[in-house]
């Protein structure tokens, strides 16, 4: 059994690739979210500065400079470590109140540094400068809080992305382990098949996933392979068993002909009998080869739209006199409904129904009625060939499709035992089901063509 390391498995590698892609995508999305958050916080900060400026300016009630100075100073005292900056000056630029000594900032909203307020550090600030009633008022706020919040958000995204990637890798390892077990089951089964155990099958979980579907298809292929191998084995046994008698008979006939020739007597009759035996043996081998060709599916490329009603009408017309010569009645019964066309090989389908008609004529006996029927059943088409002859015992109905198999009562009649085998092979090639039933008395053969329907006639 081939062993694959977890970290070398396709499932784990895919998990790594997708976790990496997920992490990169997560980081990009996090960075974009970080920028959006920063932009929103800055907008909120700008709006807060404007509102603070408006609040202080509206508190000034004409020439009440002392009250204005006290208000600004109270704001300045409440500010912690210059996270908020307030500066009030008169028209000459002399400081009246505030927590900074100067405010060299542009009018309106502006981004400035601590140096513009006389600090020695390098933090960034956002400021709003305006005048009212000859007084200059500057309100500012540090970006440090916003940057801390943005950094916290970015760090959270990084940790979340890393954690998600780690979870994806662990999940990939677990998935790879589960998939590897199933792959090993498939490999083990195929190894058993390779060693000749054609009964080995891949265990199914019946959960409908892709691996289960694949395993089911492999099992179906193995079923088909086992069937073909068994068929070949059975053919070999049947050939050895059923052709042994005609070959021995041929050898006896030839030996008799040689003796007649050695005695100077006419051996023409024996030679003609030998020729007939040789022709029959040759026909048997040709039929076996034809069945093998059909089972290989090599004739499907010749499929074309076929109307079954046309084939049956031609065959009834061809065999009605043959049946009459055997004191039998052959007829076709069909309902007055449109019968769809199917996709198939017209020549092979003709041979299929001809074999069934010939079997019925040969075995039904004098005075019997042979009836062909064509009906539409749902989306499928059912073709029936029935007679009121002796029929086939139920215990042997599944065996008559075997190559060279013949009923005991049929061994005295001409034939090779390949007619129904040919019928089964042609039906299988067309994806049709075939069933034998009892008409009480007689036999009913029904072939159901599944919907390979192209159009309605």
Image: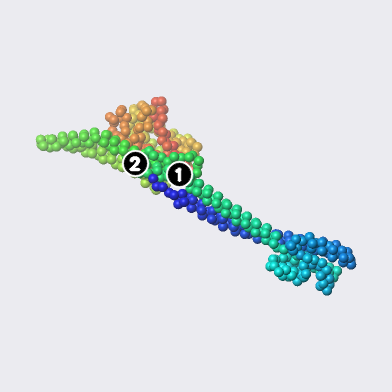
Mark 2 closeness class: few <14, some 14–19, many ≥20 residues within 10 Å: few
Left or right: 306 with respect to 118? left
Give the residue displayed 18% in from the left and 34% down from the top.
Answer: 252
**Along the viewing direction, whichever of 57 and 401 lies nearer the viewer:** 57
Vertical side of 145 occupied by 288: above or below: above
Quadrant of the image containing the N terminus: top left
Residue that sits furthest to the bottom in the current view: 92
Give the residue displayed 56% in from the left and 55% down from the top.
Answer: 23
Vertical side of 1 occupied by 397: above or below: above
Residue picked out by circle 2: 196
Indicate the quadrant where residue 110 lies: bottom right
Indicate the quadrant where residue 97 lies: bottom right
Residue 296 position within the rendered picture, expressed as x and y whole percent measured from the top left: 36, 44
Left or right: 199 with respect to 415? right
Residue that sits furthest to the left in the current view: 263
Left or right: 319 with respect to 337? left
**Along the viewing direction, whichever of 355 and 420 lies nearer the viewer:** 420
Q: Earlier in the sequence, mark 2 or mark 1?
A: 1
Indicate the quadrant where residue 226 lies: top left
Give the residue displayed 47% in from the left and 38% down from the top.
Answer: 380
Residue 325 position within the rendered picture, expressed as x and y whole percent measured from the top left: 32, 31
Residue picked out by circle 1: 181
Q: Is residue 399 visible?
A: yes
Q: Is residue 105 visible?
A: no
Give the residue displayed 57% in from the left and 52% down from the top.
Answer: 163
Mark 1 closeness class: few <14, some 14–19, many ≥20 residues within 10 Å: some
Query: Alpha-carbon distance for marks 2 and 1?
Result: 23 Å
Residue 427 position within the rendered picture, expressed as x and y whole percent measured from the top left: 39, 39
Residue that sits furthest to the right in the current view: 63
Q: Secondary structure at mark 1?
A: helix
Residue 14 position within the rendered picture, expressed as x and y whole percent measured from the top left: 50, 52
Q: Secondary structure at mark 2?
A: loop
């Amino acid at each position: 059994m081939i062993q694959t390391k977890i970290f070398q498995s396709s499932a784990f590698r895919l998990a790594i690739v997708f976790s990496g892609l997920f992490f990169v995508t997560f980081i990009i999305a996090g960075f974009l979210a970080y920028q959006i958050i920063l932009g929103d916080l800055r907008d909120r900060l700008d709006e807060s500065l404007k509102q603070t400026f408006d609040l202080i300016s509206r508190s000034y009630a004409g020439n009440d400079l002392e009250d204005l100075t006290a208000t600004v100073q109270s704001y300045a005292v409440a500010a912690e470590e210059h996270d908020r900056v307030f500066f009030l000056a008169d028209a000459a630029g002399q400081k009246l109140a505030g927590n900074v000594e100067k405010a060299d900032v542009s009018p309106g909203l502006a981004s400035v540094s601590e140096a513009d307020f006389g600090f020695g550090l390098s933090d960034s600030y956002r400021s709003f400068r305006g005048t009212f009633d000859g007084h200059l008022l500057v309100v500012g706020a540090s970006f440090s809080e916003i940057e801390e919040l943005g950094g916290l958000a970015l760090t959270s995204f990084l940790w979340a992305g890393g954690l998600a990637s780690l979870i994806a890798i662990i999940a990939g390892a677990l998935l790879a382990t589960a998939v590897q077990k199933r792959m090993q089951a498939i490999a083990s089964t195929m190894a058993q098949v390779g060693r000749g155990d054609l009964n080995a099958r891949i265990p199914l979980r019946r959960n409908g996933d892709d691996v289960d579907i694949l395993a089911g298809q492999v099992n179906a292929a193995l079923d088909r392979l086992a069937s073909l191998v068994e068929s070949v084995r059975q053919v070999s046994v049947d050939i050895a068993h059923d052709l042994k008698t005609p070959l021995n008979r041929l050898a006896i006939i030839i030996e008799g002909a040689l003796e007649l020739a050695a005695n100077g007597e006419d051996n023409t009759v024996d030679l003609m009998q030998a020729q007939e035996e040789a022709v029959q043996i040759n026909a048997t081998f040709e039929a076996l080869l034809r069945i093998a060709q059909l089972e290989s599916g090599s004739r499907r490329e010749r499929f074309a739209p076929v109307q079954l009603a046309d084939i049956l009408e031609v065959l009834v017309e061809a065999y009605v006199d043959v049946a009459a010569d055997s004191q039998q009645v052959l007829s076709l019964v069909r309902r007055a409904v449109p019968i769809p066309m199917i996709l198939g090989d017209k020549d092979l389908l003709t041979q299929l129904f001809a074999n069934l008609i010939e079997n019925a004529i040969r075995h039904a006996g004098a005075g019997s009625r042979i009836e062909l029927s064509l009906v539409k059943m749902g989306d499928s088409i059912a073709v029936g060939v029935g007679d009121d002859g002796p029929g086939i015992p139920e215990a042997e109905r599944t065996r008559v499709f075997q190559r060279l198999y013949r009923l005991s009562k049929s061994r005295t009649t001409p034939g090779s035992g390949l007619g129904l085998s040919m019928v089964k092979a042609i039906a299988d090639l067309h994806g049709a089901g075939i069933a034998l039933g009892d008409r009480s008395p007689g036999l009913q053969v029904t072939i159901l063509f599944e919907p390979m329907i192209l159009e309605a006639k």
